Image (tube, helix red, strand yellow):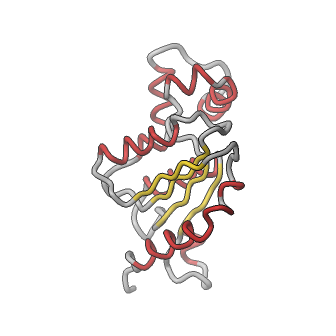
Amino acid sequence: MRAARSDSRCNGQVGAAGASAGASHAAFLAADGTAFDDKVEVAVCLSGAYDFSDPLSLSTSYGFKNKVENYCFVGTPPPEPTYSATLLADSPVSKVTSSVSPMMLVQSDNESMPPQQMPDLAAKLNSVGAVNYQSILVAGTRHGWPNWAPLKDQELAFIAAALASNPPPTP
C-alpha cells in the first residue's frame, strides 16, 4: 500500500479490486489500517471469502473449509474453541469497523463461493453502521473476475465516486 501510494504516478489515492482470495484481501485493505497510509480508499470485491469461521460455509463446502484451513493454520488445525476463534480472527469481517472504506461486493447466486459469505460481510457492515457499501447479487455461476465485465461501468462509477468524496490530505 505504501509503495503504491508513494509512486510518482499516484495522486495519493489507492483503491483495490480483487476476485476470490483477492476479494478477501481487498476487503482487508478496506477494513484495516490507517487512512491514506496502509488502507485503501475504496475496494471492489468479487466473490470473496469474508468470514472464514462461518459454520454453514465450513459444513457445506469442503473446498472452502480446506482453503481457509490452509490459509489460517500450519499443519493440523487446533481443536475448538481455538479453531473457530482463529478462523474468525483471520477473517476480513473481524477487521470491519465504522471507519471502513467504501466497498462494492459482487457475487453470483449460484457460484462456487458459499453463498452466505457476502451476506456475512454485509451483516457486519450493517452492525457497525457502515452505509458506504453496495452488495450486488447477480444471476449465474460466474466466480471471481467474470463478474467484473457485466458490471464494469457500475464498478468504475463506484470507485470514481468514492475517490472523489475522499480526496487525499494536502501534504
Q: Position of residue 42 (x, y in %)?
A: 48, 65
Image height of 154 relative to 138, above or below:
below
Q: Quadrant of residue 162?
A: bottom left
Left or right: residue 69 compared with residue 32: right
Left or right: residue 125 compared with residue 103: left
Q: Residue, x 40% and y 62% (percent of image)?
A: 34
Q: Quadrant of residue 76?
A: top right
Q: Position of residue 7 (x, y in %)?
A: 60, 79
Q: Residue, x 37% and y 48% (percent of image)?
A: 125
Q: Quadrant of the C terminus?
A: bottom left
Q: Quadrant of the N terminus?
A: bottom right
Residue furthest to the top: 79
Image height of 80 relative to 98, above or below:
above
Near-viewer residue (4 or 115)? 115
Tally the numbered discs. 0
Q: Residue, x 58% and y 45% (percent of image)?
A: 48
Residue furthest to the left: 129
Left or right: residue 148 compared with residue 53: right
Q: Position of residue 118 (x, y in %)?
A: 50, 42
Image height of 9 relative to 2, above or below:
below
Q: Position of residue 137 (x, y in %)?
A: 54, 48
